Amino acid sequence: MKRLNHNARVLVTDGGRATVFRNAGQVGQPDLVPLKAYHQDNPPNREQATDKPSRVMESVGSSRSSAEQPDYHQMTEDRFVKGIAADMAKDLTAGEFTDIVVVAPPVAMGVWRKAVAPALARATLGEITKDLTKHTAPAIAEIVVKALEGS
């Protein structure tokens, strides 16, 4: 059974905001203290992609079709999560923590898994695929402890 150790980190993120908590409590009695907070303004895709979709002329005939526009909103969220992964890897290398629990919605968790360094992947105690960015620290601690006890 995994446990949330003293000084372990809990990263709660989605594509637009993130909070890194440090467990100031003991094993079994977590006390999550906010350590770092990240935030980015990411307007909807309709406000970022103002151009009309590009058109493609078919090589045979007179047909035209539009090309799909990239999802700039999702690309910005992915870049945000990758930046947090790089920041956490830097903190791990500096010896600031040895264990981390990551809490993120499924899409952000997928980006996290692709972006995480091997050393950070080994330091990961658990991954919880939920969006808890608007929850309080005690509620997050309770959910994390239950998830770790169940794994």
Image (cartoon, rainbow, N blue to C red):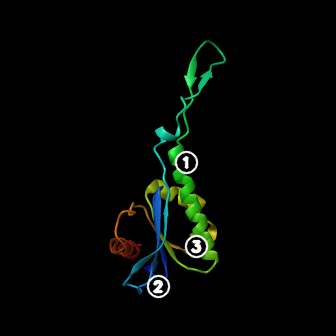
Q: Whole-Å distance between the Cαs marked 2 and 1?
A: 35 Å
Q: Residue at x 46, y 44 (%)?
A: 44
> Which residue is painted at 56% across and 22% down in the image?
65
Q: Name the image quarter holding residue 142.
A: bottom left
Which is more N-terminal, label 1 or label 2?
2
Q: Nearer the viewer, mark 2 or mark 1?
A: 1
Residue 65 vs 91, above or below: the answer is above
Identify the residue under disc 1. 75
Residue at disc 2, secondary structure: loop
Amino acid residing under circle 3: Arg
Under circle 1, the secondary element is helix
Q: Position of residue 97 (x, y in %)?
A: 55, 79
Q: Where is residue 104 shown, x and y percent of the image?
A: 45, 61
Reading the chain from its start, which is encountered first: label 1 or label 3?
Answer: 1
- Where is mark 3, residue-wise? 122
**Farthest right residue in view:** 59
- Which secondary structure, mark 3? helix
The disc at residue 6 is 2
Q: Residue at x 42, y 78 (%)?
A: 33
Looking at the rendered structure, the kind of residue marked 2 is His
Q: Position of residue 109 (x, y in %)?
A: 49, 59
Measured in 3D between alpha carbons, the distance from the residue under mark 1 to the one under mark 3, in whole angstroms, is 27 Å
Separation (CA) of disc 3 from disc 2: 18 Å
Q: In the image, 67: left or right of 144?
A: right
Q: Which circle's residue, 3 or 2, is located before the other in the chain?
A: 2
Please name which of the two marks, 1 or 3, marks the residue nearer to the observer.
1
Q: Residue at x 47, y 38 (%)?
A: 46
Q: Amino acid at mark 1?
A: Met
